[in-house]
Amino acid sequence: MCETSEDTVAAGPEKPLLPLPPGCVTGAFVQRRKRFSVELLLNGASVWVHSNNSGSMLGLTRPGAPVLASPATNPARKLKYTQECVWLTESAVPSGPADSGPEHGRGFWVGVNTSVPNRMLEAAFRAGRLDFAAGYATLAREAKRGQSRLDGLFTGPDLPPLWVECKNVTMVEDDAACFPDAASERGQKHLRELMDIVRSGERAAMFYLVQRPDGHCFAPADFIDPVYAELFYEATACGVEIYPYRAAISPRGVDLGGLLPVRDVSKGRNGNFSRW
């Protein structure tokens, strides 16, 4: 269990950092037969929509769950919509400002579009809302380092390069927002690369965007990928910075919330927490 975070998330501002485009639709989840597409029931018809989420979306593939999808920007694309978020009905979540979705049940939106964290990193930086990047002048997306590419590279006068890798978080277990939701060799590789960067004298950070409001701390999902969890805590000890930001999700779009505390592995799964 987690201690309750002081940060609260409402339905989001009128103008979120990442607004959803006009023309979004809401359908009912049917199935996820293929890795990058899901079937929805939209206005009584079966429609396949694109999903860029390669994780398991554990707990978010419930038949009948409302799904918000945005129209494709390319009119020639085979799948005309992209899955943005899933409505999770939860009786433990009281009705209120955060209950901005379907009227039939209390709950909240969970953002499953994995391109959002990368775009949020840039939008929040341009808006001056990333304290850990204060003083940096530029952000390069998909920056190359050796044979690899990382999601972001911040540079600025008289400041060490700051390399950032972004991850989307959609799973909560025992009040903790957890990543990954499926074993991830790619995620393990990124942590090793970030440790190498720190050892070279530069800064490195993980930017986790928690796209649901019910997690009160952050922890690696040791019960799903123990190797990733071990590398995560090794990376924190090495000096890799950890920034789990909560997001505010609504049909208007996605906005940046506050930082969540990180669970201290030395205290076990019910242990103490730290803030960067």
Image (cartoon, grey):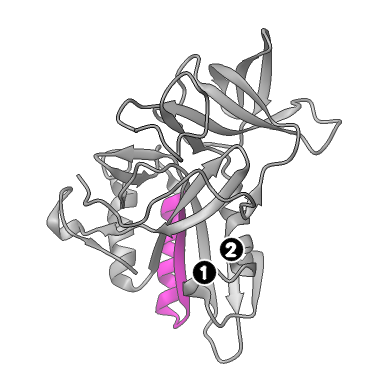
> Is the residue under label 1 in contact with that under label 2 (CB below 8 Å)?
yes
> Is 44 situated above or below 103?
above
Q: Nearer the viewer, residue 218 or 16?
A: 16
Q: SS at mark 2? A: helix
Q: Residue at x 71, y 29 (%)?
A: 81
Residue 53 shown in magenta:
no
Label ID, residue 130? 1
Q: Residues within 10 Å of mark 1 (few under 14, many from 20)?
A: some
Q: Quadrant of residue 276?
A: bottom left
> Is 144 situated above or below 81?
below
Left or right placement of residue 42 versus residue 72 in this view: left
Q: Nearer the viewer, residue 75 or 21?
A: 21
Q: SS at mark 1? A: loop
Give the percent coordinates (x, y) of residue 24.
70, 31
Give the percent coordinates (x, y) of residue 18.
64, 51
Q: Residue at x 64, y 68 (%)?
A: 126
Q: Nearer the viewer, residue 4 or 199?
A: 4
Q: Which residues are magenta?
A: 187-209
